[in-house]
């Protein structure tokens, strides 16, 4: 059957173009792949190839014609034994215009595996630093699963730039505890490939500031590939390391990346505060089948907390913890700022304000339910983070309480954040740039109209 | 010390006779022709508005992927960039599923959520389909790392172009692959143009020597000759598989069509393209070789042509008949449910 030759589009936005010239004459034999004619648009010139062997039949659009609509018939390709006058022409394939899709609400997040009663794990505990808790979490999961391995700068022979991986090389050997060259982009990508290939890498960034070299692989390769593959290519990987300001290390080593990573679907983002958080959340991150960004804090590494001894103390991802119950104002915080919020709560108590402190633990998914339930009780909210306010975690929480609990608010949400400047080096300026407990106290009094 | 060598004109006939049966030779012809016809059909369907966005065709480069894949074993990993339709077909992925992904339908390999540049098949060990130039190189190196870690005897064939070869992450990967002796076969498809920038205007030195500083052997191969590709791949896949570390095969090839569909084609002359097509076409020349050496007759090749025409027609029909993804699919596959 003769085949219609149609005016092609060179781009999804092209609607018409010029048929510049014919490269074959009527009646001339053509082979599949041979150029038939040439079209021009304001952007490009392209030769159009025959899709089948045959003979060029009648030319319907003359060379030089402008404004030829996309999908218009420009000629007919004849098969063996067919003449230009053959009656039937193969039906033109209709261009399928996608039907408009009505907006669909995002389904509620899937239920997370919950430890229904976290308190029961505290029957038997040991005193551990955050550093030791992180190391214990990795060691336990490496014993449990041979596919779990650690790679990063100085994680093996140096025993960790911040000693978080201390002892792992001795127990697990160089095959599973791997010193990398200083090539964040390369080793992050390599670890993503290893995860696609069936392993469960733990990638240590010496600080998350250096993960900027690798963020392409964290986002474009790790976070997006499951979706782009229609669910085939899971990427079970943990990117961990210290995040945020340490002490007097200047702007390039002191940024909080919580909102950067929490912005992206396809990632989970965790930020532990205590040693128990560190252990229970890191074990959850390693067992999770998804890419997890695990934001630690250098200043917390040496601080000690009670940590449950049970090796099945694995915290649920997506669940916050109420560290201090209160009825007058809700304070949300994560990582090091949880401690500051608790300090602020004590000061507020002395002034007769009973603050509830929520340790967010998980920034994506965010435990919206716990925040909203607390707000229903207190009707006032202060968010605390070390990073900048602009498009920050506090901004997100403020937006969602405005959307979902507007009537529960008795005062505007207050955000306590890092100053909107690159972090300065000078001791006094650094102190001024970072949130302090006093700022949290002031913000809480302000939303309670108690200034 | 790494050996790097620049191959002169291929000795395809001899390479082919040594170890390859007529049936295998015909399968290379068939695979190359299927890719060519599939891509022509893709171009046609793009022109009809059935395929959206970016669409990068592999026409002209068919001998590279067919020659390399001919020496790989089931379970070896394959990864490439966004010019990926040919690699998927050569990996044995179904033309229907590939074409339906191009049209964004639920029958596509990524259920319509990936498109031309993002398709995958766990079953065929094809790991994409990546859109950031060069990013597939560390990922492919990581697949090799996983093979070595698991000790499964497989290798990773990591394809990239003459554009990607200037990306820093490629050298970060070379360094780690050489340092840790990872079983990674780097296939550098030099089609002479990184989008519209000619190799000489973007890349200093010879590309097959880019691994020399890391002790990675590199050879330049006539990528328009499937038997020359196969001969090099046989030697170096064996080297990589034996645990000696990575190798680089620079395939001298040529892309007939634009970088993507909307390519102004101002950066090279029509005469240049026509000359390559006339003198070095991998399919035409191989067809002639098959006939001259008596591996096939005009009739048997015509039969293959007909068979491929049916496959491509069916793929195109499937890609238009398969429904669009259900709107509920918008929200699935963001995370693996624990």
Image (cartoon, coloured by chain):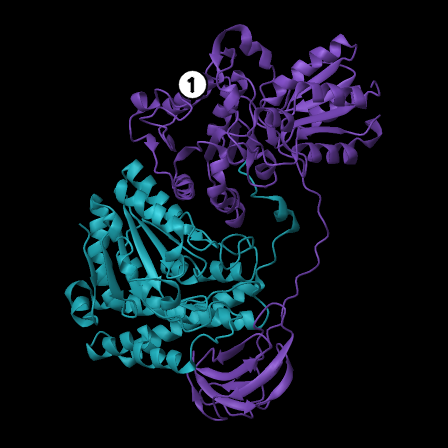
Near-viewer residue (A305 or B114): A305
Q: Position of residue A447 (x, y in %)?
A: 80, 23
Going 52% across and 42% down the picture, which residue do you hit?
Answer: A223
The picture quadrant where one finds residue A392 is top right
The picture quadrant where one finds residue A160 is top left
Above or below, B274 relative to B20: below
Q: Position of residue A431 (x, y in %)?
A: 61, 24
Apparent side of residue A378 relative to residue A324 in the rendered image (left or right): right
**Res A280 seen here:** no
Near-viewer residue (A285 or A414): A414
Question: Mark 1: few, some, or many residues within 10 Å (few <14, many ≥20)?
Answer: many
Near-viewer residue (A53 or A284): A284
Above or below, A184 relative to A120: below
Above or below, A220 relative to B187: above
Q: Position of residue B59 (x, y in %)?
A: 40, 70
Q: Position of residue B221 (x, y in %)?
A: 25, 65
Q: Which residue is mark 1?
A: A136
Color of chain A here?
purple
Quadrant housing the C terminus of chain A: top right
Above or below, A77 relative to B180: below
Q: Secondary structure at mark 1?
A: helix
Near-viewer residue (A290 or A412): A412
- Tell how many labels: 1
Going 58% across and 84% down the picture, which residue do you hit?
Answer: A19
Apparent side of residue B289 relative to residue A125 in the rendered image (left or right): left
Color of chain B here?
cyan
**Res A335 seen here:** yes
Q: Chain of mark 1?
A: A
């Amino acid at each position: 059957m003769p085949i219609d030759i149609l005016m092609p589009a060179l781009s999804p936005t092209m609607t018409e173009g010029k048929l510049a010239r014919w490269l074959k004459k009527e009646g001339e034999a053509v082979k599949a792949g041979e150029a038939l004619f040439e079209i021009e648009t304001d952007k490009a010139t392209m030769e159009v190839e025959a899709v089948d062997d045959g003979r060029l039949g009648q030319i319907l659009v003359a060379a030089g014609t402008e404004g030829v609509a996309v999908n218009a018939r420009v000629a007919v390709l004849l098969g063996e034994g067919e003449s230009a006058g053959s009656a039937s022409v193969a039906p033109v394939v209709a261009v399928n215009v996608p039907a408009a899709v009505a907006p669909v609400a995002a389904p509620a997040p899937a239920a997370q595996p919950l430890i229904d009663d976290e308190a029961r794990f505290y029957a038997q505990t040991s005193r551990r630093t955050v550093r030791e808790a992180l190391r214990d979490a990795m060691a336990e999961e490496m014993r449990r699963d041979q596919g779990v391995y650690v790679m990063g700068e100085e994680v093996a022979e140096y025993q960790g730039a911040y000693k978080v991986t201390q002892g792992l090389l001795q127990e697990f050997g160089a095959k599973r505890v791997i010193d990398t060259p200083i090539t964040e982009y390369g080793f992050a990508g390599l670890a993503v490939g290893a995860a696609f290939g069936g392993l469960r890498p733990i990638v240590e960034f010496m600080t998350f500031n250096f993960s900027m070299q690798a963020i392409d692989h964290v986002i474009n390769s790790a976070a997006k590939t499951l979706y782009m593959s229609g669910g085939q290519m899971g990427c079970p990987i943990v990117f961990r390391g210290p995040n945020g300001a340490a002490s007097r290390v200047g702007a390039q080593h002191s940024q909080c990346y919580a909102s950067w990573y929490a912005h992206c679907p396809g990632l989970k983002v965790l930020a532990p505060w205590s040693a128990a958080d560190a252990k229970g959340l890191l074990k959850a991150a390693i067992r999770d089948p998804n890419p997890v960004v695990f934001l630690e804090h250098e200043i917390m590494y040496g601080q000690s907390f009670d940590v449950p001894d049970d090796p099945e103390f694995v915290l649920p991802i997506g669940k916050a913890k109420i560290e201090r119950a209160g009825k007058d104002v809700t304070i949300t915080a994560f990582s090091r700022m949880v401690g500051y919020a608790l300090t602020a709560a004590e000061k507020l108590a002395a002034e007769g304000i009973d603050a509830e402190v929520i340790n967010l633990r998980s920034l994506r998914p965010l435990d919206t339910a716990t925040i909203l339930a607390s707000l229903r009780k207190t009707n006032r909210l202060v968010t605390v983070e070390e990073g900048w306010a602009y498009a920050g975690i506090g901004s997100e929480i403020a937006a969602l309480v405005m959307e979902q609990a507007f009537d529960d608010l008795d005062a505007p949400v207050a955000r306590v954040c890092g100053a909107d400047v690159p972090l300065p080096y000078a001791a006094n300026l650094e102190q001024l740039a970072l949130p302090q407990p006093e700022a949290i106290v002031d913000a809480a009094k302000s939303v309670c109209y108690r200034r | 010390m790494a050996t790097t060598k620049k191959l002169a004109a291929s000795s395809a006939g001899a390479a082919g006779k040594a170890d390859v049966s007529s049936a295998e030779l015909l399968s290379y012809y068939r695979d190359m022709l299927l890719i060519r016809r599939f891509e022509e059909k893709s171009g046609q369907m793009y022109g009809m508005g059935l395929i959206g966005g970016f669409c990068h065709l592999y026409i002209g480069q068919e001998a590279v992927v067919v020659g390399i894949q001919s020496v790989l074993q089931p379970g070896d990993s394959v990864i490439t960039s966004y010019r990926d339709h040919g690699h998927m077909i050569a990996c044995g992925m179904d033309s229907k599923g590939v074409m339906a992904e191009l049209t964004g339908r639920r029958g596509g390999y990524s259920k319509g959520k990936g498109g031309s540049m993002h398709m995958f098949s766990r079953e065929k060990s094809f790991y994409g389909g990546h859109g950031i130039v060069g990013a597939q190189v560390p990922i492919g190196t990581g697949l090799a790392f996983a093979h070595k870690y698991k000790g499964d005897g497989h290798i990773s064939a990591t394809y990239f172009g003459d554009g990607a070869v200037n990306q820093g992450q490629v050298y970060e990967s070379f360094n780690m692959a050489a340092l840790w002796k990872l079983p990674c076969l780097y296939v550098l498809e030099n089609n002479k143009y990184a989008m519209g920038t000619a190799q000489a205007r973007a890349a200093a030195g010879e590309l097959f020597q880019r691994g020399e500083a890391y002790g990675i052997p590199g050879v330049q191969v006539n990528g328009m000759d499937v038997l020359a590709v196969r001969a090099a791949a046989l030697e170096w896949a064996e080297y990589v598989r034996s645990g000696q570390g990575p190798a680089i095969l620079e395939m001298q090839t040529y892309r007939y069509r634009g970088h993507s569909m909307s390519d102004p084609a101002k950066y090279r002359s029509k005469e240049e393209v026509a000359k390559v097509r006339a003198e070095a076409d991998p399919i035409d020349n191989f067809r002639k070789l098959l006939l001259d050496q008596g591996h096939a007759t005009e009739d048997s090749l015509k039969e293959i042509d007909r068979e491929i025409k049916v496959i491509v027609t069916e793929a195109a029909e499937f890609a238009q008949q398969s429904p669009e993804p259900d709107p509920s699919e918008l929200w699935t596959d963001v995370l693996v449910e624990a």
